[in-house]
Image: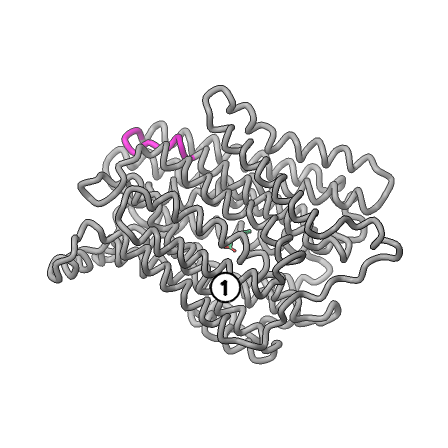
């Protein structure tokens, strides 16, 4: 549990030391750590370019899409990535086993990025679909494999997951530096022109780098024999087996349900069907309320999970605009230079991960120090949402200033700092609480609910981002302000409802 021993808090080399901290952990953790590092490298490296590539005019090698349309594509793609984790997890449990699932998923992800590397108008959707399907197989199952390395009472488990989260963010930190350099820097464009390549196709070199990253992750997995093939099943309660439907039937049902849900979510983009978006909040709220009336502990705990899902969804709806609203703000309205050093605008995308690497050890130490006195998870959710609200409040004066010309890069540094503090309060806390609220045999279901929150949040991020207009800073300020208000209200709701939520959670804090 002692993360402090593994990582010196606050040192810039925290990530490197974290890797060394792998030593006291089961052998498989190193493999999973590096495989996930490279998978996230590919995900965030491509995401840093995606919207900029879609809106760039054809003369600059882009697709010339209106920003609002690109925002919807972004939301639907990132939604699909996380929604497909639900059938992806079930596919591993019933059919493939986790090891095969991550290998097949990783290969599909790499194929998707290499598809995007081809400069052709048709490759965008084919590439995105491949990455989304592959990530659905990869992401939930690599996390499950981490869990399977530790026995139920192994005290190293939480530290193992914290290290794994470090791996995610080392990938997320490095990737935009590489892909942004390849796609956006004058140096790269000059190099391409000198060698007879088309310099405006530099985007596709960035996408190829994402593909190379995933390939490295895949090789690490493929050449490693220490990983368990499948995750040992949790013990079933007595007499439960007879009621369990056939696993294949379960997979078909879950996949069909997910696809139906996805169809409804996509339908909500159509004129006249936007009202369907209210269901993202109203349906989980109704389920939570209904379950809260139950006298059975287990049902009430599921009620709490749906409340957390709503909080997480609102959080991600604002946070995940990093890759769209904030990426566009960075590219079109911010000076990409610090102390005279000019850099590609995609580099701003590294800040979130950089702050995670710096702050995660501090938070681990803080929770350790507070021990029993630390706030309950609903309070942490409220605090996380409050930090997020502040981050968008900060963007109001930044947007107003943007009317005068490009603004200082420090606004975005401040934004990402506040958002990352929020992330530390909500994301790891939410994941751990969900898995503890679920009965042992239903941890996969709890993860599914957690990923559903991420999926719906990412979808809403795309929807909210359709309001982005770089030409109208006033409208932009208004958009940041109402979204800050939304996060602020959600924070207040969590504070006010804490006693009720804690009642639903029973003995789980
Ligand atoms: N940075 C996190 C990751 O890539 C974001 C995330 C949180 C994704 C929760 C899915 C679910 O893993």
Against 34, is 286 above or below? above
For label 1, the residue is: 36
Q: Residue 472: percent from the left, percent from the top?
A: 30, 29
In this rendering, position of residue 246 left or right of residue 473: right
* The one of 112 and 313 positioned closer to us in this rendering: 112
**Is residue 354 in view from this perspective?**
no
Q: Nearer the viewer, residue 174 or 251?
A: 251
Q: Is residue 101 left or right of residue 235?
A: left
**Residue farthest to the bottom?**
23
User: Cβ of disc 1 within 8 Å of ligand 1?
Assistant: no
81 is higher (above) or lower (below) than 310: below
Residue 167 in the image, given as x and y percentages of width and height: 49, 66
Q: Residues within 10 Å of mark 1 (few under 14, many from 20)?
A: many
Indicate yes or no whether the magenta region holds residue 30: no
Residue 266 in the image, given as x and y percentages of width and height? 50, 33
Q: Which residues are magenta?
A: 465-472
Prevailing SS of the magenta stretch: loop
Q: Residue at x 50, y 50 (%)?
A: 133
* Residue displayed at 85% across by 57% down: 237
Q: Nearer the viewer, residue 97 or 168?
A: 97
Image quarter in which the N terminus is found: bottom right
Relative depth, front residue between 332 and 388? 332
SS state under label 1? helix
- Quadrant housing residue 155: bottom right
- What percent of the width, then of the height, locates residue 420? 49, 53
Number of callouts:
1
Q: Would you place residue 73 above or below residue 354 in this image? A: above
Q: What residue sits 43% from the left and 72% below the top?
A: 13
């Amino acid at each position: 549990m002692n993360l402090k021993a593994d990582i010196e808090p606050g040192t810039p080399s925290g990530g490197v030391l974290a890797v060394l901290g792998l030593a006291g952990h089961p052998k498989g953790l190193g493999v999973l750590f590096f495989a996930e590092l490279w998978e996230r490298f590919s995900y965030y490296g491509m995401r840093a370019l995606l919207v900029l590539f879609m809106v760039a005019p054809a003369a600059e090698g882009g697709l010339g899409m209106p920003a609002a349309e690109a925002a919807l594509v972004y939301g639907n793609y990132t939604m699909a990535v996380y929604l497909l984790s639900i059938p992806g997890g079930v596919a591993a449990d019933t059919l493939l086993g986790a090891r095969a699932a991550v290998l097949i998923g990783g290969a599909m992800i790499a194929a998707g990025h290499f598809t995007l590397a081809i400069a052709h108008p048709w490759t965008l959707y084919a590439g995105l679909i491949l990455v989304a399907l592959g990530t659905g197989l990869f992401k939930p199952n690599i996390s499950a494999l981490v869990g399977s390395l530790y026995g139920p009472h192994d005290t190293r488990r939480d530290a193992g997951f914290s290290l794994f989260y470090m791996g995610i963010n080392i990938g997320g930190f490095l990737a935009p530096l590489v892909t942004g350099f390849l796609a956006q820097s004058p140096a790269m464009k000059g190099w391409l022109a000198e060698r007879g390549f088309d310099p405006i196709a530099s985007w596709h070199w960035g996408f190829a780098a994402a593909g190379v990253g995933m390939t490295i992750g895949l090789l690490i997995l493929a050449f490693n024999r220490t990983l368990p093939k499948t995750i040992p099943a949790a013990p079933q309660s007595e007499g439960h087996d007879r009621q369990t439907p056939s696993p294949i039937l379960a997979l078909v049902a879950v996949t069909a349900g997910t696809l139906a849900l996805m169809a409804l979510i996509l339908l909500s983009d159509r004129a006249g069907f936007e009202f369907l978006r209210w269901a993202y909040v109203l349906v989980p709220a109704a389920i939570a309320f209904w379950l809260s009336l139950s006298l059975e502990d287990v049902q009430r705990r599921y009620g709490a999970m749906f409340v957390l899902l709503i909080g997480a969804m609102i959080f991600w709806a604002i946070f995940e605009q990093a890759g769209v609203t904030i990426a566009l703000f960075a590219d079109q309205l911010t000076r990409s230079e610090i102390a005279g050093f000019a850099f590609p605008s995609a580099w701003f995308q590294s800040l979130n991960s950089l702050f995670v690497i710096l702050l995660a050890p501090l938070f681990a130490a803080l929770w350790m120090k507070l021990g029993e006195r630390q706030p309950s998870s609903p309070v942490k959710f409220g605090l996380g949402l409050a930090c997020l609200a502040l981050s968008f409040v900060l963007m109001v004066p930044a947007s107003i200033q943007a009317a005068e010309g490009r603004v200082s890069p420090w606004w975005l540094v401040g934004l990402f700092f506040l958002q990352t503090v929020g992330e530390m309060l909500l994301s790891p806390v939410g994941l751990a609480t969900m898995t503890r609220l679920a009965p042992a045999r239903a941890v996969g279901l709890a993860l599914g609910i957690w990923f559903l929150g991420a999926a719906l949040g990412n979808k809403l991020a795309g929807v909210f981002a359709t309001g982005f207009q770089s030409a109208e800073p006033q409208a932009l300020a208004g958009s940041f302000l109402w979204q800050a208000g939304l996060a602020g209200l959600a924070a207040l709701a969590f504070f006010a409802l804490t006693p009720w939520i804690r009642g639903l959670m029973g003995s789980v804090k």
